[in-house]
């Protein structure tokens, strides 16, 4: 195994283990709806878990996409084999069109075609669910960023700056009083 393969294997293992990280007392792999609600838990916890969640669900999503493609390729191979069998069986009886072959294939293999299509729909459904959940985590990241920006804007708004100025002025007054008391003590002593 070369270095790149070892690294990729480590990353894959890492992403799988990220599902065990928890937020609100539940592991990421539980896909708890509260994970996407920033009102639950502290923002620090949400921000801290965000990269792990994106890596974990992103890997699951990519795995599902590969599974859909694999099933579609397998179905295509199966169709070609059956098409070839039907063509060989029909051509013995004379001239035939592609439509004749497809029609025979559909008639002879209806049950298997339905099973293949159901299997592909199921893996596509899983892929779509993971895609939706992954996109929700990405949206949560955007929401956290917006929330942080709004908070920063509020923190540094003119009103807050004025309040901080007043607080600093009061602190300066207190410091002046303390300095005056210290200087009087030094003069007496």
Image (cartoon, rainbow, N blue to C red):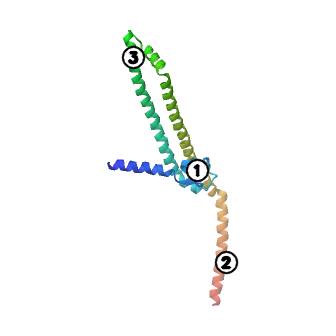
Identify the residue at horizontal 58%, vertical 50% (top origin). 144
- Which secondary structure lies at badge 1? helix
Tell me the crowding category of disc 3: few under 14, some 14 to 19, or many 20 or more residues within 10 angstroms, Cα based: some
Identify the residue at horizontal 66%, vertical 67% (top origin). 167
**Nearest to N terminus: mark 3 or mark 1:** 3
Tell me the crowding category of disc 1: few under 14, some 14 to 19, or many 20 or more residues within 10 angstroms, Cα based: some
Vertical comparison of 103 with 173: above or below: above
Residue 93 position, x and y percent, is 39, 10
Residue 21 position, x and y percent, is 52, 54
- On the image, numbered disc 1 is attached to which residue? 144
- On the image, numbered disc 3 is attached to which residue? 87
- On the image, numbered disc 2 is attached to which residue? 177
**Disc 3 vs disc 1: which is toward the camera?**
3
* Quadrant of the rendering where the C terminus is positioned: bottom right
Instruction: Give the CA separation, mark 1 to mark 2.
Output: 44 Å
Instruction: Give the CA separation, mark 3 to mark 1.
Output: 59 Å
**Disc 2 vs disc 3: which is toward the camera?**
3
């Amino acid at each position: 195994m070369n270095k790149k393969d070892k690294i990729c294997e480590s990353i894959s293992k890492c992403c799988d283990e990220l599902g065990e990280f928890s937020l609100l007392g539940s592991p990421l792999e539980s896909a708890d709806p509260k994970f996407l609600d920033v009102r639950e838990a502290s923002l620090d916890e949400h921000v801290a878990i965000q990269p792990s969640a994106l890596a974990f669900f992103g890997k699951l999503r990519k795995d599902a996409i590969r599974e859909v493609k694999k099933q579609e390729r397998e179905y295509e191979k199966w169709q070609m084999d059956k098409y070839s069998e039907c063509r060989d069986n029909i051509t013995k009886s004379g001239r035939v069109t592609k439509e004749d072959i497809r029609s025979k294939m559909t008639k002879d293999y209806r049950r298997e075609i339905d099973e293949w299509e159901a299997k592909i729909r199921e893996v596509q459904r899983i892929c779509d669910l993971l895609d939706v959940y992954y996109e929700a985590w990405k949206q949560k990241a955007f929401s956290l960023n917006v929330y942080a920006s709004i908070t920063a804007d509020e923190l540094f708004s003119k009103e807050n700056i004025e309040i901080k100025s007043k607080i600093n002025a009061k602190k300066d007054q207190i410091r002046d009083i303390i300095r005056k008391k210290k200087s009087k003590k030094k003069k007496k002593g």
